[in-house]
Amino acid sequence: MTRTAEMQQSIAVVDLGGQYCHMIGRRLRDLGVRSDILPHNASCENLAGYAGIILSGGPQSVYAQESPKVDSDILKLEKPILGICYGHQLLAKLLDCDVTPGNEEYGQATLTLRDKGSLFYDTPKAQTVWMSHGDSVRTLSAGLKSLAQTDACKIAAFGDFDRKLFGVQFHPEVDHTQYGRQLLENFTRKICEVRGQEKIEDTVNRLIQTIRDRVGNRSVFFFVSGGVDSTVAFTLCARALPKERVIGVYVDTGMMRKNETEELRDLLSSAGLSEQLRIYDASDQFLTALKGQTDPEEKRKIIGKQFIDVQSQAMREYGIDSEHWMLGQGTIYPDTIESGGASGVSALIKTHHNRCDEVREMIANDRVIEPLAEFYKDEVRKIGRILDLSEKLTGRWPFPGPGLAIRVLGTEKTEQITKFPLEKKFKNYKAYKFPIRSVGVQGDGRTYREIVAIRGPLTDYKSLAELSVTLCNRGRIFNRAIVQVAGSAIDLSEGQVRCGGLSNARIELLRQADHVVRTKMEERKQTKSVWQFPVVLIPVSLEGGETIVLRPVNSEDGMTANWARLQPNLLKDIGEAVAEIPGVDAVFLDITDKPPATIEWE
């Protein structure tokens, strides 16, 4: 098939800077539909060759001077267009509709259809969708019809059936939109009339060939963290290149989980890769560089720089000529987009250690190979299975490259905890404002806001979910809510957030708590009931110690997530066991979805 013929059976996804832009292409890939992701300034001449156009979400307001725009002549192409979130608002503005700030909406919402026409074909009148927006379309111009609404958004979808122009305020591409895939299939298959099927059986062979083409005569020095991503990427490189041209280095940063090094050695040995693995102890180096640090961005940048320094040190020790070697990383797409993406218009959520300035410079000089940079966590697991890696490895909980460093929160000053008023309908609960901040993602942009802590009925998950959404959507105060599970019974307003940064003692305290959580989940055979289970240490002191937060989540790909509803007796058992660790005053459960929170706290 020629390139022109491919385009005629493909969708152009215009990148307007949204956190989920690339996921649109991924969802189309799941449907067997080809797509290309193009910059917002792509010419109409280029767009004209596609079967249809999707305008992605984005973090900015359509009225902001610096916000990404598209050529208004896009409407003259007479191609089907679907605008998503910011793209919905931008399309509405191009069509002379009224878009205004207000009615912020983050997380799940119930969509009620007014019209079950082509875009919503074969979906129910009421359905769950995923929202993340600050602006809203208020009024529609002549020829447009409102297709759906939520409680907070009266025009949650609109359409012009004659011109095949549609906008949806929610994100159909994320897994938590109930009928999102059906909507995208309706748009591509029924409205754009795309017929071709893109097969994915040859994904691994294509990746292996791509590695060979990119690397050429060079070799690869690969950082292996023990997580799914880096191990699968390392395995791909090991399959693509001769054994002597691939070295995997596991760096012990001093911030790993208990028994992590031994587990990794066993897993890679079972995959036949132990001969190519080196263990490099740099714990003193990392901990010295990070001592006392509290700012999450600074911690990530320091860690990224230390990895580059370790690379240089290790290559010298192993007698490797750096001019003929590339750095291999297990970067996946969520790492890239949260670090600001490649489009130049995506919001920075957090700088992943594999996207520090030094790594970016190496990328610019073609010194980095990242076989999985276009893929998501669930796709990486599938690739791992195709490579015959063990289920114990491919099914592991994700663990961040920076290790426990980004799960130990600190603050530079001591502050008192204060009470926070709740609405009458939440009379069974009490809320407290914790003057400590975590990273969130709201409206496709980064937030760094305070935490709200709750006390009350722990097993009423429905009320806790409603309370969390209400508090995080109320004003611009919080992006994360937690509820107490175990520990001190004193009034939380008597406690305080204490000054403290990263230290060996605090990392060790968290390591113990993390080990207790993993052990309890394994004993109950519940490890597969959650997608990831971060355990976080925060400097909240009630009786002289600190506080542990449990963060079990369920997700498909890490771009969106729901907090996991653990079995009440299991949650109680874990909470009480962690509370018994010397130095732990209290244990909380994070009850926040992504958005408005990120999965990790930093």
Image (cartoon, rainbow, N blue to C red):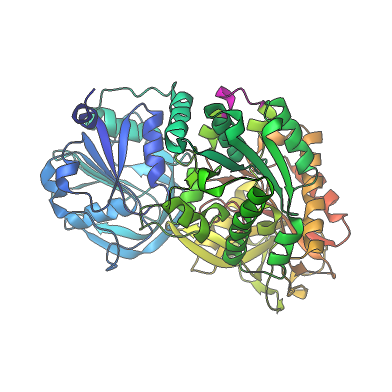
Q: Is residue 431 above or below residue 593?
A: below
Instruction: Answer yes or no: is residue 252 visible.
Output: yes
Q: Is residue 274 shown left or right of residue 476?
A: right
Of residue 132 and residue 437, the one placed in the foreground of this image is 437
Does the magenta portion include 387?
A: yes
Kindly identify the residue that appears in the image at 40 percent across and 53 percent down. Answer: 151
List x then y, in percent, for residue 460: 67, 48
Q: Is residue 385 shown left or right of residue 15?
A: right
List x then y, in percent, for residue 430: 68, 65
Instruction: Answer yes or no: is residue 117 visible.
Output: no
Q: What is the quadrant of residue 277 in the picture?
A: top right
In the picture, the quarter occupied by the C terminus is bottom right
Kindly identify the residue that appears in the image at 47 percent across and 44 percent down. Answer: 333
In the picture, the quarter occupied by the N terminus is top left
Of residue 173 and residue 478, the one placed in the foreground of this image is 173
List x then y, in percent, for residue 358: 52, 59
Q: Is residue 24 above or below residue 72?
A: above
Of residue 339 and residue 523, the one placed in the foreground of this image is 339
Q: Which residues are magenta?
A: 384-390
Kindly identify the residue that appears in the image at 61 percent across and 71 percent down. Answer: 421
List x then y, in percent, for residue 171: 39, 45
Of residue 25 and residue 46, the one placed in the foreground of this image is 46
- Residue furthest out toward the left: 76
Q: Is residue 403 above or below residue 184?
A: below
Q: Is residue 230 shown left or right of residue 13?
A: right
